[in-house]
Image (cartoon, rainbow, N blue to C red):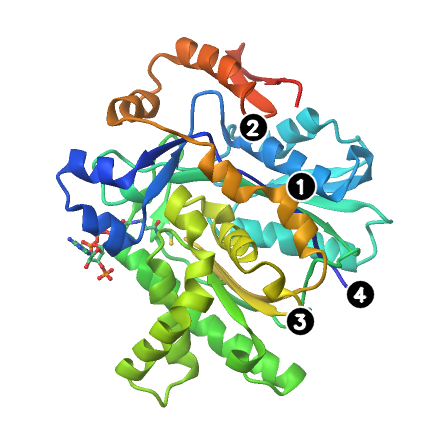
Amino acid sequence: MKAGISSIGIYIPPLYLSHDDLADARDIPRDKYKIGLGNINMAIVPPWDDPVTMAANAAKMAMEAAGVEKDEIGLLIVSTETGVDQSKPVSSFVHGLLGIGRRSRVYEIKHACYGGTVAIMNAVNWVRSQHHRGKKALVITTDIAKYGLNTAGEPTQGAGAVAFIISDETEFMHFLPSMNAFYSNDVHDFWRPNGYATPMVDGKYSIQCYLDALEFCSHDLQDNLMQETGKHLLDFVDYFIYHLPFTKMAKKAHTKMLATLRPELNEEQIAAIYEADYADKIQPALTGSQQVGNIYTGSVYMCLLSLLESKQEELENKNIGIFSYGSGCGAEFLISHVGRGLQQQLQKLNFRKQIDRRIKISMDEYAAIYGDKDQAAALQMGMELQDADPFSRFIFTGIKEHKRQYVKTGSH
Ligand code: COA
């Protein structure tokens, strides 16, 4: 039974900070961020957005793109590592804001940046198991990647949500069954203890854990594929996308994958293949990461959107390898197949338009937002700005009696 993505929505917050401004303020050479990390701008979350509004905004777009009504949703899973409550899941807030019916299973999943893939696979298996009784699943990844000021992680911040309708009506994109490769290991590469607003991260170790997971999964995926199809992974898959905590990770990851699967080649030969692949196969997937930054659970899927928007109908009938990694750690390498209907999807997605609509903020404004200063004034600004923002349908308006408050906004 086919099961896969029948529609995608994305929401990127309306503010951004340029990496050049951040580099100047931190007295770091601009090229370290631009070339060393590969980042250009990063999304900044205004006080009127949070993981809930971002999730609901992305979901609304995914539902509208597919013409899916709220009563058609039987399963809603939100994956996040920036939950807003220790007990009440983000999915419950989203369930309420979208008005999804009560005859539904609704929950939140956490496994660092890998959680989005776990959520998608749970939904795919729910559809494949036939327990869906004709209903569809809504899966949302939503996160704010917030690191400490003046830390090595600061230029790798970002925020955004990606939403998917998962169903058996998958003209657009489906996952190839029984070919996934998994990896889990108990490590402390990145974690955020209870009560902390920003994570502890051993950045270099985290990159090593990621590459170890990729090497392991590449072998397993290659073996699984060979058993199922008799084909080599590098011949079967047309494009590879990777979880990107920062843009340059794509180079480290692709090089590692190539070196793992082509052990007969030396470092120079692998580097030459990477250079040859870059313009057509790697760069098209990087726009989101360069412009938005890390969105944790949705990062690899923002790469997917960047690739779809860049290559358009060239991708029809192509296989895309998706490598998902989450600290802690868990990883999965899977293969999706692009079918028909890409053009209609992209017209409704407006990913590039969302990036272009954003307002650039100064370092002073960044510091005020980071420190949650002037909340009331900022929320008022949110009420005024949202009317001009066709992508924002829900905003956060503060906390009353320990309960988070949201409103639906504007006429759009
Ligand atoms: N011009 C060009 N490149 C430069 C440069 C300059 N002036 N100065 C430094 N660089 C390059 C370095 O050579 C290095 O490149 P390489 O990785 O290809 O060797 C890169 O910029 C990073 O600089 P470096 O000093 O090695 O690291 P850092 O202390 O800035 O930390 C990270 C980088 C990625 C480890 C850090 O940003 C981090 O911890 N990020 C979070 C990681 C994360 O999110 N992990 C979670 C799950 S995957």
Q: Badges 2 and 4: C-beta atoms under 8 Å apart?
A: no
Q: Badges 3 and 1: C-beta atoms under 8 Å apart?
A: no
Q: Is mark 4 on a helix, strand or loop?
A: loop
| Picture residue at 74% right of the left edge, 44% below the top | 66
Q: Residue 53, which numbered label? A: 2
Query: Mark 2 or mark 1: which comes first in sequence?
Result: 2
Residue identifier under label 3: 178
Position of residue 294 measured from the top left corner of the image (x, y, whole percent): 40, 45
Query: Mark 2 or mark 4: which comes first in sequence?
Result: 4
Residue identifier under label 1: 62
Q: Nearer the viewer, residue 201 or 193?
A: 201
Q: Nearer the viewer, residue 104 or 46?
A: 46
Q: Badges 3 and 2: C-beta atoms under 8 Å apart?
A: no
Q: What element carries label 1?
A: helix
Position of residue 154 measured from the top left corner of the image (x, y, whole percent): 28, 40
Residue 275 occupies which quadrant of the picture? bottom left
Amino acid marked by disc 1: Ala
Between the residue at mark 3 and the residue at mark 2, the CA separation in whole angstroms equals 35 Å
Query: Mark 3 or mark 2: which comes first in sequence?
Result: 2
Q: Which of marks 4 and 1 is in front?
A: 1
| Picture residue at 78% right of the left edge, 40% below the top | 68
Q: What element carries label 3?
A: loop
Query: Mark 3 or mark 4: which comes first in sequence?
Result: 4
Position of residue 136 measured from the top left corner of the image (x, y, whole percent): 77, 46
Amino acid marked by disc 4: Met
Q: Is residue 140 visible?
A: no
> Split into 4 quadrants, where in the image is the N terminus?
bottom right
Residue identifier under label 4: 1
Q: Which of marks 3 and 4 is in front?
A: 4
Q: Which of marks 2 and 1 is in front?
A: 1
Query: Which residue is the extreme one toward the right?
Result: 133
